[in-house]
Structure formats: structure tokens, C-alpha cells
């Protein structure tokens, strides 16, 4: 506190010099409106024994504010600071004021009300302060969504004049530069374009004994432009402010152990905010209470921002458009896409591996493999869902709960983002989950998908749904590197992950009857059951059947080729079938398939040759199995998979992602 009293020198007869410092960046209309009001505000200080100057620091290297500054109705000192970011602009203002006593910061989108500057100076003198913060009052250039007002995003409550503060914002802030110079304070460049530079600066001032007080009579109007009057902007603001606040706390904490503890506390607190905020948002939705809905949403994103900071991730709120806007929609630009799939592993579905390779080699497309950190806090233009339900299951109940919460946070990020397009490849028509919370979340994802990729021509979509058709590629090149097996006459094969809905039990029952009619038949089944109980059931069903071989575990590619190529016919008796990688895998190895009749399989048969796609109606029975096997033994040649080449898959996906971004932008403009 003493520092301010020693430096302001009320007993001195010297004239106090004050600079009004205005950082600006490509907002000439707003800057012009601000400069028009300053002559009246300066005139109000005539009896205070001060001289006032105006300094505009243009953070645009092109000098876009020069004409406005030079055309103002008062003398304005104008300089250009080419280094990007608000930190560089504020430090340039400090550098330009080395011979001044006081500095009054005001942002270029603010309008000072009557007595704005004179009130700051009077409170500075009365309290011997090192800094004085005034009010910033939000005003709007159009009608405001009541949800935004209820969220508290633009709420800045008044305080009693003279209230001592530990932190201050620089939008309306008077600094005693003699104190600042003596303490050696500057805005920290390490914050880059992330914001929060004024928070750190003022906290450091208070920690070193500086006195910061509040002036309720000093008011500026902050014009909130239309681009900020959206729920997605409010959500992003909540994220960025929490992110900056937590990073600053970490920066002000001494010692690795203390910072480590603070990171853990931030992680736990962030998760708690997401949980509580999500529950409050849900309650608001159910009760139609916009306050609970808005405050809950804001709390979720504050939790995200806190977690991001704890993990060392920074959100650059003031990133320049040329750097920030990677949502490129023209074919010659680069688009960043986060896949819901991680890096391929030995057990990964070949479709995922081949798609990963295709996307990774496509020019103009940056493929990001999934990680929770990047998905929740990273920068990308589109998010590509494949099987959302896979993100909701863990090996224990608490892991499943954690994954559900993380997925919910990710979904809310996408829902409230103005720039991330959500794309989903429609692998399955039905949502495969009977757990009520998971089913609700899967429906939410589906409802708020911006763009869909369908991998066959029969996928049903609502009229007007934005989508692209990218046919499921074949696996000929993938499996060609593995040696084929010698054909075993009479062998029926079935492979793939074993699930109840795939109808394997019915096929086994049909085989049990068929083998009594045609003793030459045998059966090989390969794949990992979804539950141990399902595996036990299959062993019990086949224990007394002749010619059955079970491999109830994951099949390597080499093992899969051996099973498929040694079989006369591959039987996939799914109860529900729309897109099946197993069907294409069998056809890629020139093996016919027996599948249930539906629109998708009929279309596939017309494409590759009806003799290669044998179909049955209703439940699979023994006569159908025997008839299909006999037809399969007469086949020669290979199915026609000419439309299933992977060569163009990456480019087709890149085009779809760009189309999705255009859809997202169009919807955002309509909000």
C-alpha cells in the first residue's frame, strides 16, 4: 500500500501527465466512435491539474487504424506494434509512456461515459492507489437471447468505491506508472495470444504491495457486437477465461510440488464442474428453466477450461484470423480433422486401418488420430465419428462412468462450438445400446451431427440431410500379402466379432440339421465373443456337433485369411445387417457369402454379381444352408469390386469434410 503513497506526490506542484492508451486491431469503426468521445472526457479534467494525451497502438502491421487516428478531432499519437497479440500491444503502450505519470487503459470497443477519466484520477488521489479500476458495462447492438443474459457471461456487478481489489481487468484501468516502473512490472509475453495478461499483471502488482482500488463512478460502455451474441461464443468465453485463470494461478505458484498439487486440484475441480454443470443443464432442459440451463452450460465449459490448463494446454483467445481460421472449404486449402479412431493396433478393424492410411496420405487434409486431450481442448475443423458407442464402454463401472462424462463434455464442446463441424459415418442404422443414459447421449450425438457419410446407397436418411456417399472399400490389397489356404470341401466359415445380434446361434442350429442331410459339411467359427457367457454358450451348442472348429478369440489377418480361403462359403447370419466389413472381407478373398435379404445386400449383389451374394428370407434353416453351399461350389472367377477401390477414399472424405464445414458455417450464421 505504501508504494502508491510514496510515488503519487500530492504535495508536488508539477503538472501530472496522463496518457489514454488504446490498443486496437482491425476495428476502425469502433475506434473512431471511441476517439469522438474523448475530447469531452478530457475537458472534464481541466480543473484537476493534469495534462492528457492520447496514444493509439495499432496491432495490425498494415496500419489499418492510421487514417482514423490521424483524422480524430484531437491530437493522437499513433504507433504500429507489429508483434501479434494483446500482450505486445499493451507493453508497447507502457514503452511509449516512459515519461508519463499515469496511464488510463481503454479498449477500442468501449465508449467512456461522463466523468470516466476524472473519476479515476480523483479516486487515485483520494486513496493513494497504484491502480484504479472502473466499471465496464455491456451494451448490445441488437436484441439479446435471454439465455445469454441468464448465463451471466456479460454480468459485471458494481462495487463500492474504494473497495480494495486483488485483481483487475485492463478494459477500464488507471495505472500509476511510477509504481509500475519501480516494481519492474510488464505484461507477460509468455501468455502469448491466450489472454489473461491483465489478470496476471494486476495480481503481481498486488502481491508486491501495490494498492488496487475500485471506482464505481468511472464507467465505460462495452459494445457487444452481433458475432458475440451466440451461445457458442459464451461457451467458448467461459472456457477461455477459466483456462487463463488456472494457468495464471499455476504461474503464480512457487515450487514444483505446490504446482503439482494445484494441477491435481484443478483436474478434480474441472471434472466436478463438468458433472455439476451437466446435471444443472439437464435439469434446466427438463424444467424449461433457462437460468439453470445457461449457468450449467457455462459451468461445463469452465470445467473444460480448467482441465485444459491443468494439462498444460492453452487456448489462444486472441489468435489472428489467418492462424485461427483453419476451417478451409476450398479444395486447395488444408483442413484439420479429428477422427474418433485412435492409432491402429494389431486388433484394429482393417476398415479403420485402411481409412487411416487413406486420410493420412491425402493432400490438403491433416488427419488427427483420437486422443482425449486433443479432442476436448485441441484445434480442429471437423470431428469424424464412426461408432460413438465405443467411447462409452470401459472395463469397470467407474471407467465407463468416466468415459461417459468425457464423451458428454466432448459432445457439448461440439454442440456449442461455432466452428467445429461434426461428421458421422453411418455404419449402423440402429443405436446399439439399451442403457438409458448412453442411449440418450448417442441420440444427442446423432441429432446434432452436421453432416453424414454413408457407405452404401441404401442408407435411409431424412429428406434434406447433408451427406456424401463414399462406398466401403474392398480388402483385396490388404489380405493379398497373406498366403491362402487350400479349399476344404464342405467347409462353411463364419468370422468377425461375436455379438448376440449377429445371429450365430441360429446358424449353428441350422448347421446341426444340415449336417445330417449333407455329412460332408463342416464348420469353422472365428472371432472374440463380446462376453464370456456368450463364448460358453457357443461351446455348449457345438459340443456334440460333428465337424465344428471354434477359435473364440481375436483372429489375426493371417488366421482370418486361412479361415476364409479354406471355406466354400462364408455365412453371416446377422439379425441386423446394413454395412458389414465381414461381407466385403469375404468377397475380397473371392469367397461367396450367405446373408439375410435386405435392401443393402440386394444392392451389393447387383453390384458385384448375384451369384456371390446369396440371400435368405426369414430365419436361416438347414435347406437354405445346403442349397447355398451347393451353389457356392460351382462358382468360378471373382466378384466385381471395381467400385470399391481405396485410391480415392481419402480425397472423397476430404471433400465431405469441407462440405460439412460449409454446412456448419451456414447454420452458425443463422443462429
Image (cartoon, grey):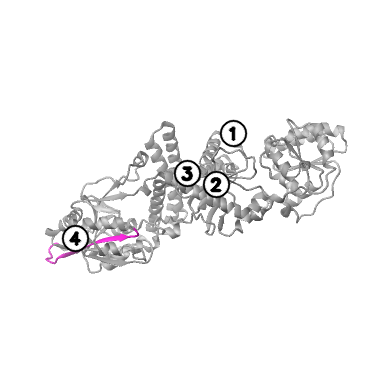
Tag on residue 434? Answer: 1
For residue 5, which numbered disc appears in the image?
Answer: 4
| Few, some or many residues within 10 Å of mark 4 (<14, 14–19, 20+) | some
Residue at mark 2:
423
- The Cα atoms of the two marked residues, 4 and 2, are separated by 61 Å
Number of other residues with Cα within 10 Å of mark 2, as a class: few under 14, some 14 to 19, many 20 or more: many
Name the side, left or right, on which 171 lies relative to 408. Answer: left
Residue 37 on image: x %, y %: 22, 55
Q: Earlier in the sequence, mark 1 or mark 3?
A: 3
Q: State the residue in front, 92 or 254.
A: 92
- Report the span colored magenta: 10-26
Q: Percent from the top left, x then y, of residue 366? A: 55, 57
- Nearer mark to the viewer, of 1 and 3: 3
Specify the label residue 415 is tagged with: 3
In the image, residue 36 lies at what x, y percent? 23, 57
Are the residues tagged 4 and 2 within 8 Å (C-beta)? no
Q: Residue at x 27, y 45 (%)?
A: 157
> Tag 1's secondary structure?
loop
Closer to the observer: label 4 or label 3?
3
Looking at the rendered structure, the secondary structure element under dot 3 is helix
Q: Is residue 191 above or below residue 407?
A: below
Rounded to the nearest angstrom, the CA distance separating label 1 from label 2 is 24 Å
Residue at 88 percent across and 38 percent down: it is 520
- Quarter of the image containing the C terminus? top left
Say whether residue 554 is magenta: no
Measured in 3D between alpha carbons, the distance from the residue under mark 4 to the one under mark 3, in whole angstroms, is 52 Å
Q: Relative to 429, is 165 on the left or the right?
A: left
Amino acid at each position: 500500500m505504501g508504494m502508491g503513497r510514496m510515488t503519487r506526490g500530492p504535495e508536488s506542484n508539477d503538472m501530472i501527465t496522463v496518457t489514454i492508451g488504446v490498443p486496437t486491431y482491425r476495428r476502425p469503426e469502433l475506434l473512431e466512435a471511441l476517439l469522438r468521445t474523448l475530447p469531452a472526457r478530457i475537458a472534464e479534467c481541466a480543473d484537476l491539474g493534469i495534462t492528457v494525451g492520447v496514444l493509439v497502438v495499432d496491432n495490425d502491421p498494415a496500419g489499418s487504424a492510421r487514417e482514423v487516428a490521424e483524422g480524430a478531432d484531437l491530437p493522437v499519437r499513433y504507433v504500429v506494434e507489429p508483434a501479434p497479440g494483446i500482450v505486445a500491444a499493451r507493453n508497447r503502450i507502457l514503452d511509449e509512456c516512459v515519461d508519463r505519470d499515469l496511464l488510463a487503459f481503454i479498449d477500442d470497443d468501449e465508449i467512456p461515459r461522463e466523468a470516466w477519466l476524472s473519476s479515476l484520477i480523483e479516486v487515485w488521489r483520494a486513496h493513494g492507489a497504484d491502480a484504479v479500476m472502473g466499471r465496464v458495462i455491456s451494451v448490445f447492438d441488437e436484441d439479446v437471447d435471454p439465455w445469454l443474459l441468464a448465463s451471466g457471461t456479460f454480468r459485471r456487478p458494481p462495487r463500492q468505491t474504494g473497495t480494495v481489489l486483488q485483481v483487475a481487468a485492463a478494459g477500464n484501468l488507471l495505472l500509476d506508472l511510477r509504481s509500475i516502473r519501480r516494481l519492474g512490472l510488464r505484461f507477460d509475453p509468455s501468455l502469448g495470444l491466450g489472454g489473461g495478461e491483465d489478470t496476471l499483471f494486476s495480481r503481481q502488482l498486488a502481491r508486491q504491495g501495490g494498492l488496487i482500488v475500485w471506482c464505481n463512478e468511472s464507467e465505460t460502455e462495452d459494445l457487444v457486437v452481433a458475432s458475440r451474441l451466440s451461445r457458442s461464443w459464451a461457451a467458448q468465453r467461459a472456457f477461455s477465461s477459466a483456462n487463463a485463470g488456472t494457468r495464471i494461478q499455476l504461474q503464480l505458484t512457487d515450487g514444483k510440488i505446490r504446482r503439482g498439487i494445484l494441477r491435481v486440484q484443478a483436474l478434480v475441480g474441472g471434472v466436478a464442474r463438468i458433472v455439476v454443470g451437466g446435471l444443472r443443464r439437464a435439469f434446466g432442459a427438463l424444467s424449461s428453466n433457462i437460468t439453470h440451463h445457461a449457468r450449467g452450460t457455462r459451468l461445463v465449459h469452465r470445467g473444460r477450461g480448467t482441465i485444459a490448463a491443468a494439462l498444460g494446454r492453452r487456448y489462444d483467445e486472441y489468435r489472428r484470423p489467418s492462424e485461427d481460421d483453419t476451417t478451409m472449404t476450398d479444395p486447395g486449402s488444408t483442413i484439420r480433422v479429428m477422427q474418433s479412431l485412435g492409432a491402429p493396433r494389431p486388433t484394429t478393424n482393417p476398415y479403420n486401418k485402411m481409412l487411416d492410411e487413406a486420410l493420412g496420405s491425402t493432400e490438403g487434409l491433416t488427419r488427427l488420430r483420437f486422443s482425449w486431450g486433443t479432442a476436448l481442448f485441441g484445434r480442429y475443423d471437423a470431428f469424424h465419428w464412426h461408432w460413438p458407442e465405443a467411447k462409452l464402454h470401459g472395463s469397470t463401472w467407474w471407467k465407463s462412468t468416466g468415459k461417459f462424462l468425457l464423451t458428454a463434455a466432448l459432445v457439448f464442446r461440439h454442440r456449442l462450438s461455432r466452428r467445429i463441424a461434426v461428421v458421422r459415418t453411418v455404419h449402423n442404422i440402429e443405436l446399439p445400446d439399451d442403457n438409458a443414459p448412453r442411449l440418450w447421449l448417442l441420440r444427442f450425438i446423432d441429432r446434432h451431427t452436421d453432416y453424414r457419410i454413408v457407405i452404401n446407397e441404401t442408407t435411409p436418411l431424412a429428406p434434406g440431410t447433408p451427406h456424401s456417399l463414399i462406398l466401403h472399400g474392398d480388402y483385396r490389397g490388404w489380405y493379398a500379402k497373406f498366403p491362402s489356404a487350400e479349399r476344404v470341401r464342405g467347409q462353411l466359415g463364419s468370422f468377425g466379432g461375436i455379438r448376440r445380434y449377429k445371429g450365430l446361434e441360429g446358424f449353428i442350429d441350422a448347421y446341426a440339421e444340415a449336417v445330417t442331410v449333407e455329412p460332408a459339411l463342416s464348420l469353422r467359427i472365428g472371432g472374440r465373443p463380446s462376453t464370456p457367457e456368450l463364448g460358453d454358450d457357443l461351446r455348449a451348442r457345438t459340443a456334440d456337433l460333428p465337424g465344428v472348429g471354434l477359435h473364440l478369440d481375436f483372429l489375426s489377418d493371417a488366421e482370418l485369411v486361412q479361415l476364409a480361403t479354406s471355406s466354400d462359403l462364408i455365412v453371416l447370419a446377422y439379425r441386423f445387417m446394413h454395412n458389414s466389413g465381414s461381407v466385403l472381407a469375404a468377397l475380397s478373398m473371392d469367397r461367396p457369402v450367405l446373408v439375410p435379404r435386405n435392401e443393402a445386400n440386394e444392392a451389393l449383389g447387383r453390384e458385384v454379381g448375384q451369384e456371390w451374394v446369396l440371400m435368405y428370407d426369414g430365419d436361416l434353416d438347414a435347406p437354405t444352408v445346403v442349397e447355398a453351399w451347393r451353389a457356392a461350389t460351382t462358382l468360378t472367377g471373382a466378384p466385381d469390386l471395381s467400385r470399391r477401390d481405396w485410391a480415392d477414399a481419402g480425397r472423397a472424405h476430404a471433400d465431405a469434410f469441407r462440405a460439412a464445414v460449409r454446412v456448419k458455417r451456414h447454420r452458425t450464421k443463422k443462429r
